[in-house]
Amino acid sequence: MTPDILDQHLAKTLSRGRVAATAPAGCPDISLYLFDPSVLEGPISHDEAQAVVAEPAYWSFCWASGQVLAAYILANPHLVRGETVLDFGSGSGIVAIAAKMAGAREAIACDIDPAALDAVEANARLNGVTVSLCSDWNARPSHVGVVTAADVLYDPDNRPLLSVFRLTAPRVLLADSRMRELGDDRYRQQAVIEARTWPDLHEFEEFNRVRVYQAAGGLAG
């Protein structure tokens, strides 16, 4: 997969869109092809703005929680070493890439967006690792050692995922900046780390405070 393909995906919503290789400040050990903000010099047309809102290219930004969880995994490689790691809602793929770099036997990026999976493949190659791709959570492998997820609780209706993750693998690593209380005490907070979306979307400061959790799986929700 090449950056040209990612440019083509971006052009579907922003005709001037293109990606550029960059290292997010919250996890500088990993480089990613992300949205190049220099294309925004000059006003965005109404039609462009409507397209971006209607079909946002989430994969073209590296959200704060993804950066923090990726950096946390790189700093604590024993959490994934030798395991099959399944990254839910992978987006740019930074967490799956970090897992593979930290010694996971296999890192699987799961995302329903085909463009995101193209981005994961290109970003993995950029970092010299191989990440497996999964477009359907229900088609995941039967043997998963660790589930990772970052910034997937932006919608409160996604809270049941917390139980789903625990039933999928013996260990869950979760990072989130949207919900101050998860409502599931089996998720134990490990750290609180500051980070910003890259490129910076100037979000509210509260969304730059990322909480990292770990849970033991295999328990009924």
Image (spheres, helix red, strand yellow):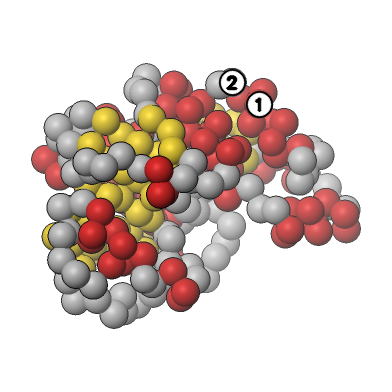
Tell me which residue sits at (55%, 31%) in the image.
118
Tell me which residue sits at (21%, 32%) in the image.
104
Quarter placement of the C terminus:
bottom left
Percent of width and height locating residue 156: 46, 75
Q: Is residue 31 visible?
A: no
Q: Give the numbered dot on residue 5.
A: 1
Percent of width and height locating residue 159: 38, 72
Q: Are marks 2 and 1 in contact (CB under 8 Å)?
A: yes
Determine whether the residue tagged by mark 2 lies in a helix, strand or loop: loop
Does 60 appear above or below 120?
below
Location of residue 125 by image quarter: top left
Determine whether the residue tagged by mark 1 lies in a helix, strand or loop: helix
Quarter placement of the N terminus:
top right
Which residue occupies the foreground of this view, 183 or 42? 183
According to the image, label 2 marks what residue? 2
Percent of width and height locating residue 14: 77, 44
